[in-house]
Image (tube, rainbow, N blue to C red):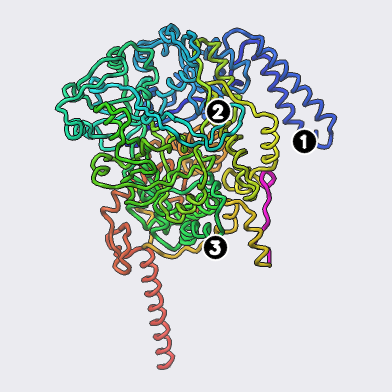
Amino acid sequence: MAKQNQVFLYSVSTDGFYTVEENVIHTELMRFYTYKKRLKVYTVGCEKRKQFINNHIKAKKNELADLFGKQKSVRTLRSDVLTDTNKISQFESTLTRTLDIEPKETTTDIIMVRAYHYPVFESLVKNGFVNEDGELYQYFTSSAGMIRNKKSIFIKKEIADSKEFKDKIWCGLSVDTINNKTFINKEGNEESGININKLNAYLALCMTSSVPFDGFNIDEAIVVKDFKTVLKDRKVDYIDKDFNITPEKEMSIEINHVDGAGMCLPSVSDKAFMFRMPHFKGLCIPFPYDKFITDVAMKEDCEVTDIYGKTWNVIEDGIRYIFTESQFKLANYYTSWQEYKDAFNNGCEFVICKEEDKKFHDKPLNYQALQTLSDITKEEIVLLAAQTNSDIAKVGGDKDTMLRLLGIYNEEDQKDSFQKALSIYPEMLNDKHSRNVIRSVRDSLYKDAKAGKLLLKGSKRTFIAPDLYAFSEWLFMGKENPMGLLKDGEVSCKLYKRKRLNVLRAPHLFREHCTRNNVRNMNTDKWFITNCIYTSVSDLISKQLMFDVDGDESHIISDPLFVSIADKNMQGILPLEYELATAKKEKVTPDAIYDALKAAYSKNIGEVSNHISKVWSLEKDKIDLDSIKQLCYLNNAIIDFAKTLWIPEFPPHVKAKIKELTNGKLPHFFTYAKDKTSDQVESITDIKKIADENERKVEMEKLSTVNKLNFIIEKKKLHFTKVVDNFDFRFLMKKKKVVKIDLQVIEKYNELNRKKKSNLDKNLKLQDNTRSITQLSVYEKIREVLLEINSNEDEVVDMLVDYLYTKKPNSKKTTLWECFGDILLRNLETNLDEAEECEDCNTRFRKVNKSKVVCDDCKVKRDRKKDTERKRKERKQTSDKNLVG
């Protein structure tokens, strides 16, 4: 999948909106803030004056808040908040393509709003807002991630009302059609509409980073019922809504084996991929079901029934995609598959948002999977940390380790320009900038390792897939309880030979180490054609890992020691089973949207998972598994809360027990895992300072699994040795020499480079995405400003390269590479084709003049040798003259 372009939009808080009356008081409030800032120096030591100023500001805040609550008119977005510091970037998506937003363009068609003041936000949701040009905006959607961060997307009403937008995004539906749809719920009562936050999530699918899938024809697709079976008499630890735990309870458990998964013919794709189309999401896995029909079902053709009751001949009708009902989120709001297809053909997109990797590099563990292995010895942890310690030690002296850590073995479309440059010109490892980057990578590796990120050989991450052979037996052969190709306790993944694997998934809160036998034989290799990890329909693994198959990934560990430790810790551990509330439907109205969002904003998932980490970080004999089970139940209820608006309450005795266990500070390793300060985490004994060996062992045994790493991970002084030939910075320039330096460009570069960190920090607070997306916004702006001074980008790049590599050779050059990496890479590729080889050391160098035959370093050596020879001759001549005299 190609790298996607990015676009920019504004993220503003509720402070950025006003009515006429509010604007007056807001201006007055700002005056007081300025007044406070100016008098700050005079308030030091004068509590009375400080209190006077603070009371004034508090009074104005209260007055403003009161006015916000009473004001009912449509608010106006202040134009002065649409600044570069409030600009965020988003990957190209169906929404950006629908709005015709060009790559790197900044749009005001959509605006993200951060809900800091609920009365203001309520007004925005219920009444919309206008910009200072009078254009009206209305609430559009909030993804699950946005809801967690109290953010929402608003869109210009004119665009939302346009036919093109309705056709491409709503695909034939509308708020009215959704509100008019009625259902009978579990209690037998009639309800209409939809769950508001579910609708939010489904509409937000159009904002998923994606690329259109060429060649998709919806007439070659059908949607069938989900494949479900009941696994009888299975033992689980059952938790009821009062948090009572019934251990080893035998139950019949219904499993939806294709929850979010569908299949396509291998002619469509040879890789599994996550896709989106209006009101659809999930994983599409290639499976040769045409061969299954003829070779296994022994049929020339095969009829199946879709979710609306229509029969299709899979072979004759040319069906190349078989989607499942769980993928079609709003299936109940259409009367037939044909109705959806007709609406889809009015310009809708079928897009890929992620596909199976081409290369599978080893991925490090996270602290959650490690902290649950409480039955582990120091010697075992030392062995698990051996490769990570080796990597840290090799930085600076091993070429392959450095290149691997710098990411040059990533897939080509995942590399940035600097990584691509390193892959074709490894001599850059000798550059001071590369060494600075390597030093930073080593420091991050050391910090991450202390936070539990250990790298184990053969640890891969890949999509989780159901046994599609069993699905096909059910769908095409009518088998009610098919066996498929895998038994209980088995998985199949082509990334490994036949061996025992530990199958993990994040988040990992309870003991969820699923050790399974990897089955590889002629049948699995024939039918399971992707690199996904396929799971058995007879296994409760989906309950234990709490996964869907709509694109969830598993982290697979094949290290025999880790698997054996996991087996030891999983003795007596059963899957957890509990009942969560179902999402209620209601009519979609501005009032209902606001109420649903406000309710969802009230819960914090991170707080519960941190409590679980606190319990796991206790001494081994104090870890209370029942309390962790109860916290896991609460955590999953909170995850669902945005949809269900229901959460169970701890009974007093459970609450008291959990409070006792979690009353302390955060685990010590959160210093490294979450950048917590020393006063926020529990302190631990410095074991290295204990002289007595037995006492050291006792203290080490008291530490939790991850905290033990604090004294196992090693970092020695970094020494760089020459592992590649010399680096010639002129390869990065278009011209061989820079004739004239534009000081204005250099000064502006230095100024923007100094401000870069503060701008990045500001953007990270606005951006819910990864740091790389945030960086793009900041660096794009720097590039834009520099090219406003000199529009010739080749000249600007050559000047900066010459200046930074000659005047400031020890400086970091991250800004240079992030802003102009594409041009630097292009220059490098061109110049390497014309590179000369040094006559003395065989190093590649760029020839500046015709007579030059050696690299700069060897020229210096030759010049020194010539100079030494000249001086020797001069001394001999002088000596000879003295002898003659």
How many marks are shown on the rendered structure? 3
In the picture of the structure, the residue carrying the numbered disc 1 is 41
Give coordinates of residue 279: x percent, y percent: 38, 20
- Relative to 552, does residue 175 appear above or below in the rendering? above
Task: Tell me the amino acid under the disc marked 2.
Answer: Ala
Left or right of 700? Residue 168 is: left
Q: Spot the residue most to the left.
A: 300
Give coordinates of residue 77: x percent, y percent: 55, 17
Q: Nearer the viewer, mark 3 or mark 2?
A: 2
Of 460 and 441, which appears nearest the observer?
460
Q: N-terminal of the two: label 2 or label 1?
A: 1
* Label 3 packing within 10 angstroms: few (<14), some (14-19), many (20+): few
Of 865 and 674, which appears nearest the observer?
674
Q: N-terminal of the two: label 3 or label 2?
A: 2
Can you see residue 241?
A: yes
Q: Spot the residue most to the bottom.
A: 884
The local secondary structure at tag 2 comes to helix
Q: Nearer the viewer, mark 2 or mark 1?
A: 2
Task: Tell me the amino acid under the disc marked 1.
Answer: Val
CA gap, disc 3 and disc 2 = 48 Å
| Quarter assignment of residue 688 | bottom right
The local secondary structure at tag 3 comes to loop
- Relative to 90, does residue 21 appear above or below in the rendering? above
- Relative to 258, does residue 713 appear above or below in the rendering? below
Magenta span covers which residues? 678-691
Figure quadrant of the N terminus: top left
Q: Residue at x 79, y 23 (%)?
A: 55
